[in-house]
Amino acid sequence: MDRATWLADRLAAVVAAYDAEAADYDQHEYPSATQREWVARLMRQLPPESMVLDAPCGTGKYFPIIAAAGHRVVGIDQSGGMLDQARARRIATSLDRLALQDLGYRDQFEAVLTIDAMENVPPEDWPRVLANVHGALHPGGFVYMTVEEIDASAIDAAFDALVCRGMPACAARWWKATWPATTTIRAATRSCSGSRPSSWTFSTRTSSGPTVGAIVTSCCAIDAEVAVENS
């Protein structure tokens, strides 16, 4: 099986799973207190009546926080079932069935939320997704993006198992080497043993865009939060 076909099959399976779980998804929610705190903090940084993109929005669980802060929200998601739940909240200005890879917004939002989603994006698509998110922002806008961390040994074990099954998985060293030459990503990640998040900064630059400063925090070994200010 070639990689493109395999990824398409995996995407279809993920979307089908979210569609199946959508109706009662919020009744079995995973812990997201940290994400809610960061969304609320970000909303306080925005000008009044800002436009916020929640991508992907899922059931729209962060919509009430955005609306309570006096802002407007646009949501996108690949799951029709999730969008139905988000639509039932009657909060979003608009909702579209769309992938992060296909975002076409340009200079429209004061903030973009990409929460608990990048783990579903193939690594070779990360530069494209980051470029799309960057393009959706007004100058000086903010991005809040979460990146899940997992122990390297678990990644190696999963990679080896997939290769043994003949699946076209790729190692991180491969897709990093094949990113466009115009894109340079430098990031620092670490975890802390206590309940108080540690934080530090990293920066990125592309040949076609400005430098981006970010604050990264990690509450545990498998959950890293990234807030990006576009300057």
Image (tube, grey):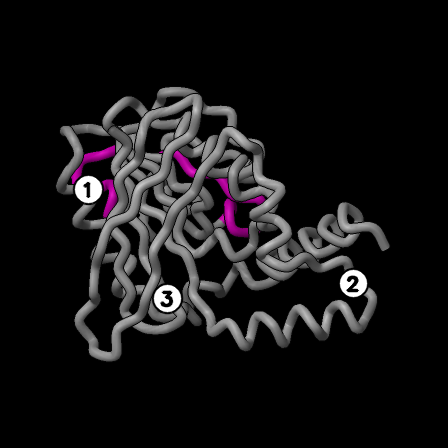
Q: Which mark is residue 167?
A: 2
Q: Which mark is residue 223?
A: 3
Is 133 covered by the magenta stretch? no
The image quadrant where one finds the C terminus is: top left
Q: Residue 146 at what x, y percent from top left?
A: 37, 54
Q: Residue 199 at what x, y percent from top left?
A: 21, 59
Mark 3 Cα-neighbour bin, 10 Å: few <14, some 14–19, many ≥20: some
Of the two numbered discs 1 and 2 in the rendering, the one whose residue sits closer to the viewer: 2
Q: Residue 174 at what x, y percent from top left?
A: 64, 52
- Magenta segment: 63-84
Residue kind at label 3, given as amino acid type: Asp
- The relative height of residue 97 versus residue 114 in the rendered view (above or below) is above
- The relative height of residue 203 versus residue 24 in the rendered view (above or below) is above
Residue kind at label 2, given as amino acid type: Met
Report whether residue 118 is seen: yes
Is 65 covered by the magenta stretch? yes
Residue assigned mark 1: 43
- Discs 3, 2 touching: Cβ within 8 Å: no
